[in-house]
Image (cartoon, helix red, strand yellow):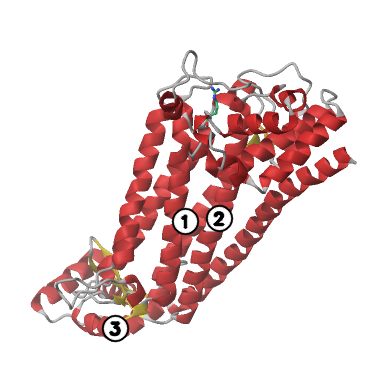
Amino acid sequence: MYRAHLLGSTEKWISRYISSIWDDREIARHIILTLLEHVIELHRCGALPRDVACKLCRELSRLYHNIDELYDRSDVEEYEDFHELLEKHLIDKLGIEIAGWVGLGRSRNDHVVTAHKLRLRELFRELLSRIVELRRTLIDRAERDRDKVFIAFTHGQPAQVTLFSHYLLSIEEVLRTYTNIFFTILENVVEKCPLGCGPAVGTTVPIDREREMTDLCFLNLCINALYCTETRDYFLITGGVLSAFSTELTRIINDLIKLSDPQINMLVLPSEHCATSSIMPHKRNPATLEIARARLGRVIGEYVSLLSIVRSVGKGYYLDLQEATPHVWNMFNIINDVLHILTDIFKRIIINEDVIRELLKKLPVTSAETVEQLCLREGRSFREVYGEVAKSLREGSARLLSPDDVLMLRRSIGSASIEFIDDQIRIARNMLEKDLSRIEELENRIRRCVENLFKTCETICT
Ligand code: ARG
């Protein structure tokens, strides 16, 4: 009976030690889809008789909707991974004369990479939808609070007067940049189909790999068989950008915590996201943001683990690679949750206009523009005027432009000014609509892949 278990050992605790069966829960459906496509292709290339292919297809399609049936088996923990459990189930159910065919022209090595990429495609879809949802919230909020004054900081100190809408749109543009990067990784790295490459360098079975790529709705073919089976570039590149992205999200959180600190009090976090102290009843601790910040730190930890594992092996499959996989799923889970939290916070956050107006009376955050305007109006050198304004600030005699004037005077594209903010909102909305239709295309591709396979099964069986 088939079982790739350890040589010379039937001790359960040892086989459990190397098993990825529970981690594989995440890609169980995708392993089934991969095997389904393999069976279809074996039939189409003439290797597998129709009745055998039909029986396998029927059982695999049924299992796709009943994964728990496999995980409920009492011997589940004895399998090295889900590929093995699945094959054993097929043998138990259909007999080795039928199920024994599925090993032909394949390996767990090309199948696991295919399954990873099918799962990643879904995770990218979810990630992109959440990013776009946050972007929409920021744009809506920017439109609603278009004219509210705000203070921009450099070095953590009050720097220039700005608009709350401009601040929100700065976050939106970061997210827009990452949206593009995630699409690029998806299309150029993840969507390269590795199916049909065998354990390392190919198979003698005349599999049409391009047909498999089309059935699974992948955009490109991963060509070199060794590259296809040994690489984890799709994890490394995705993980690298997820780490950078988690750092960007952390910086937004740092700002929200700082700006809602009662000593600054420019923003008020929604009560739903705050916890009081069990000892000091006046406290409103930014609980969700603190947890989110810590978890985003874990994303970097997961990435370091991933790098450490992959760097330790050469080309060709090593079982070490199995250990790399769960780190990537963890990164996605953490980031998706944080995006959800941030979207909710930006929907409900309150901007404390009175506090900001009071701060603006005390803080000379229009000094830079005052200097600029004196230069332009009087035709005098910047450094000369700067010196005079700096002196008057020290002596308490400065006559500075008002915040409202400054917000009318800024002239360059992207500035925080009443004149330019509408353009920025319009551009952000256009980009958002474009990205939404890209996500819709992706959703369709994911759905079409599953529909294709089930439909082909039906054709084989009729
Ligand atoms: N479960 C493995 C993984 O997740 C794939 C199996 C490859 N095992 C093997 N002995 N070639 O990477």
Q: Position of residue 28 (x, y in %)?
A: 59, 41
Q: Residue at 53% across / 20% down in the picture?
A: 316
Vertical comparison of 457 with 446: above or below: above
Q: Is mark 2 within 8 Å of ligand 1?
A: no
**Residue type indicated by callout 1:** Asn
**Residue type indicated by callout 2:** Glu
Q: Along the polypeptide, which appears first: circle 3 or circle 1?
A: 1
- Pick the residue in front: 250 or 452: 452
Image marks 1 and 2: residues in contact by CB distance under 8 Å: yes
Q: Position of residue 283 (x, y in %)?
A: 20, 74
Q: Is residue 118 visible?
A: no
Q: Along the polypeptide, which appears first: circle 3 or circle 2?
A: 2
**Residue underneath mark 2:** 126
**Residue underneath mark 1:** 336
Mark 1 closeness class: few <14, some 14–19, many ≥20 residues within 10 Å: some
Q: Secondary structure at mark 3?
A: loop
Mark 2 closeness class: few <14, some 14–19, many ≥20 residues within 10 Å: some
Q: Residue furthest front?
A: 74
Q: Secondary structure at mark 1?
A: helix
Ligand 1 position by quadrant: top right
Would you identify the image quadrant in which residue 371 lies? bottom left
Q: Residue 368's mark? A: none
Image marks 3 and 1: residues in contact by CB distance under 8 Å: no
**Residue underneath mark 3:** 402
Q: Is mark 3 within 8 Å of ligand 1?
A: no
Q: Is mark 1 within 8 Å of ligand 1?
A: no
Q: Residue at 45% across / 63% down in the picture?
A: 340
Vertical comparison of 66 with 429: above or below: above
**Residue type indicated by callout 3:** Ser
